[in-house]
Amino acid sequence: MTVKGSILAVDDTHASLKLLADILTQAGYQVRPADSGALALASAVARPPDLILLDINMPGMGGFELCRKLRDHEALRDVLVLFISALSEMQDKLAAFDAGGQDYITKPFQAEEVLARVGTHVRVRRLQHELERRVEERTAELRRTQEQLHHAQKLEAVGRLAGGIAHDFNNILSVVLTYSDIVLGDVPHDWPLRPELEEIQRAGARAAELTRHLLAFSRQQVLTPKVLDLNEVVRACCRMLGRVLGEDIELQTVLAPELGTVLADPGQVEQVLMNLVVNARDAMPTGGMLTVGTANAHLDDSYAAEHVGVAAGDYVMLSVNDTGSGMDKATQSRAFEPFFTTKERGKGTGLGLSTVFGIVNQSGGHIWLYSEPGVGTTFKIYLPRTRGQHRPESLPPQIALGGTETILLAEDDDQVRTVAEGILRRAGYRVIATTSPAAALAVCADQAVSFDLLLTDVVMPKMSGRELAERIGIERPGIRVLFMSGYTDDAVLRHGVLEAGVAFIQKPLTPAALGRKVREVLDLGRDGERP
């Protein structure tokens, strides 16, 4: 029989106490008898019951005094007390309630009456406790959601700041990288200052890499998504991981069969995996186990309700688990912030996990961190499942650099405009450089002027590069367009993902990158195919 509840029966009369115990025990209650107030108090303190049946007139400590002592004890304040007594006057009943009782049964009692009263109070109290538990659970869900929302808003604000800084810095790096490249191409290899110039170029390249990390975190990178099989990405990366991990870390993969496909940039997914692997390696300086896994997953409405920004649906999960040092709660709360690191100065930039966070979010996915100090860390990445079919990559055709076509350049930053114009002229192109969209439209209005390509910055005062391209496209149907920017949150891009048929180059500009991209766009036919 299921125990309905625990009851402490208190009465100094042996026959009455035994009768109560028999009635309640037969009905399925667990009964503890006590024949004095002192004994009852000690029993209740040692193990609080669900309900106390309490006689009033007892030698030593009476029922009223015992009830008041129970109410003074923090752990017993909410215990139900039903007085059961031969006293039938109204003042006795009022005194019972005043002492802290919840009900009053008059002796002699009927078994049915006792069971009915006790059953009602126990059920009500159990319902009350269940309601309190559910309220507490709801409050704790709400609390976690508020914390997640606050954290997401914090990362969003930092991301906007990081993206703006990266945009401005990319313009400056375009100048540094281009001119160092040009000068290095013009000076002999034995020039005394060539090593110093090469160091400048390397420093500029490292700075450009940092800005790429910032753009990734702020979800302002340009992504070229393809239908991917994450199992193939893991297998390809694992062939390189031996050199990264070392001999003291054992690598194993747990790849799900019949894995669904995702729509993501393959290069960025590889970077996510490599960054997580490097992070895991650093957490296992004395060796350990690294497990990379994949699985199909369905996130339901309850999961989505507990995780800010998650939509219920079908996903593909990529997980990286290590047996390393793990993270405490404070470290976990800051793990995805840019430049946050627990490593000593000079041992890391603090951009590895922030880059992962940005790439995953920009790809429409979610990343969750589970860690325990001394046990290890698991990162789980969920990317939306797509219905598309994965197709193997084909090698891109070789593109010849340079040309003689005419290019209309629209760039409001003086230094970047000068750099871009210099790169193009050195490659053989004729360049019409303009400082604003209005100036570019004025050139376009002159029908005597012909040009083959519009190269325009994305973000400019008064008119965006996309608006400029649309207006020029009306005057010059079919004109080829190449957009450039230090960040990618303009209307020309949707959430950082290129629209079909739109050509884009990310700043900072370098002669090789700009030369290849311009030639590629010029060689495309109007239907988007190579002639």
Image (cartoon, rainbow, N blue to C red):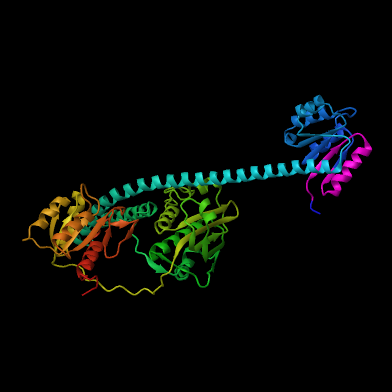
- Residue 310 against residue 236 in the figure, above or below: above
Q: Answer whether residue 22 is magenta in the image.
A: yes
Q: Nearer the viewer, residue 280 or 165?
A: 165
Provide residue 86's location: percent of width, then percent of height: 88, 31
- Residue 176 against residue 430 in the figure, above or below: above
Q: Which residue is located at x 76 percent, y 29 percent?
A: 97
Q: Give the residues in magenta.
A: 3-31
Provide residue 75's location: percent of width, then percent of height: 73, 36
Q: Which residue is located at x 20 percent, y 47 percent?
A: 462
Q: Nearer the viewer, residue 455 or 186?
A: 455
Q: Quadrant of the C terminus?
A: bottom left
Provide residue 195's location: percent of width, then percent of height: 28, 57
Outermost residue, top direction? 91
The answer to whether residue 347 is left or right of residue 509 is right
Q: Which residue is located at x 52 percent, y 72 percent?
A: 257
User: Which of the 4 image quadrants contains residue 206?
Assistant: bottom left
The answer to whether residue 202 is left or right of residue 405 is right
Q: Nearer the viewer, residue 64 or 420?
A: 64
The answer to whether residue 401 is left or right of residue 53 is left
User: Which of the 4 image quadrants contains residue 443?
Assistant: bottom left
The answer to whether residue 216 is left or right of residue 70 is left
Outermost residue, right direction? 15
Q: Quadrant of the N terminus?
A: bottom right
Outermost residue, left direction? 448
Q: Is residue 294 visible?
A: no
Q: Answer whether residue 112 is magenta in the image.
A: no
Total count of labels = 0
Q: Which residue is located at x 80 percent, y 24 percent?
A: 91
